Amino acid sequence: MFQVAIVGSGGMGSAHAGCYAAIDNATVVGAMDIRLEAAQSLAARHNAKAYTDFNRMLDELRPDIVDICVPTPWHAEYVCLAAEAELKGIVCEKPMARTIADCDRMISACEQTNTPLFIAHVLRFFPEFIRAKELVDAGAVGQPVTVRTRRGGPFPHAWSDWYANYEWSGSLVLDMIIHDFDWLRWTFGEVERVMAKSVYGKNISELDYALVTLRFKSGVMAHVEGTWADPSGFKVSFEIAGDKGILDYNFNQPTSPPFQIAQKVTKAQGVGVAVPESPLAISPYQAELSHFLSCLEQGVTPSVTPADAKAAVVISLAALSSMEAERPVRISELVS
């Protein structure tokens, strides 16, 4: 039985805790947050202990797994501290970190203590995206040429309105469409250069929108659209075109009529970042955490490696650099 301590008791921390509760070989023993009431609320739902001090939680509980669901700028801090605690593994929400230097620091800290680190890139566990990759690999569209993805919904609001702080969140590019960057790289290989445009610059308002074009080393072109300016609900779509066919997928949450007028979501209505729903008995969020625990039991490498997670951050930062410089940015400009 893996004993799990959750760090960050907000929306994603609650989602992860709920998943562990449904996994036979896991139990949540602790919930930590700088807001005592948030930690107490999550802990009460799982018969766990609440903490506001990370080191105290580790000292008292000695958990097997630490699962980090705090805002992005603090991922590196908690991963590096957790790596010193002789854990069986560390889970950290995506994006891996706000900077490449922090990604490297996290990787180094876990390598030095031989602690498995799993960054929760959940899109790889959504069945429609798994199936699309399988079909591409099997040649269903022939030679892939162009890909279009779209993802987004209303602007999210959470603790200290941190999504609206560019230096913290990196906008929807680093926080949300990094999902697509990771899946696209997994499916089509390494990205060579990036061109991106956005509506906001570095002053994120209540509306955020970005369009990112990726050129892969294989020659595939991908157009990635992200929005936090759609109050009508969370939407995801992709289109993969090749010389022998096309794959097309659309998902609207909630399902809507062909024409709909939606009002802007206010801060009072906002409940944090949208988490896509799934009709499956085992959600993709539970599947990804079960996968990591299974890998720990079997002593094998998880399907998402720290190097994969860093690569997704690099693509995101290249997009942000392209927006600022108003020119294409090569991945080699950020990493050698």
Image (cartoon, helix red, strand yellow):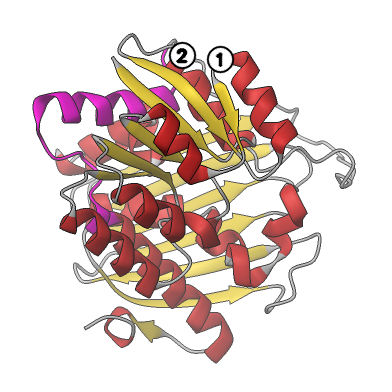
Amino acid marked by disc 1? His
Relative to 327, say whether 200 is above or below: above
Q: Which disc number belongs to residue 46?
A: 1
What residue sits right under mark 2 in the picture?
21
Q: Is residue 286 magenta?
A: yes
At a point 72% along the width and 74% down the height, the residue shown is 200
Numbered range of the magenta stretch:
282-308
Mark 1 lies on a secondary structure that is loop
Residue 80 placement: quadrant: bottom left
In this rendering, would 114 be left or right of 320? left
Seen from the viewer's position, the closer of residues 232 and 246 is 232
Name the magenta segment's main secondary structure: helix
Q: Residue at x 60, y 62 (%)?
A: 169
Mark 2 neighbour density, 10 Å: few (under 14) some (14–19) many (20 or more): some
Marks 2 and 1, how far apart at CA: 8 Å
Q: Decide if residue 78 is in sight here.
A: yes
Q: Earlier in the sequence, mark 2 or mark 1?
A: 2
Q: Tell me residue 234's x, y (percent).
A: 65, 38
Q: Is residue 103 above or below residue 327?
A: above
- Say which quarter of the image contains residue 197: bottom right
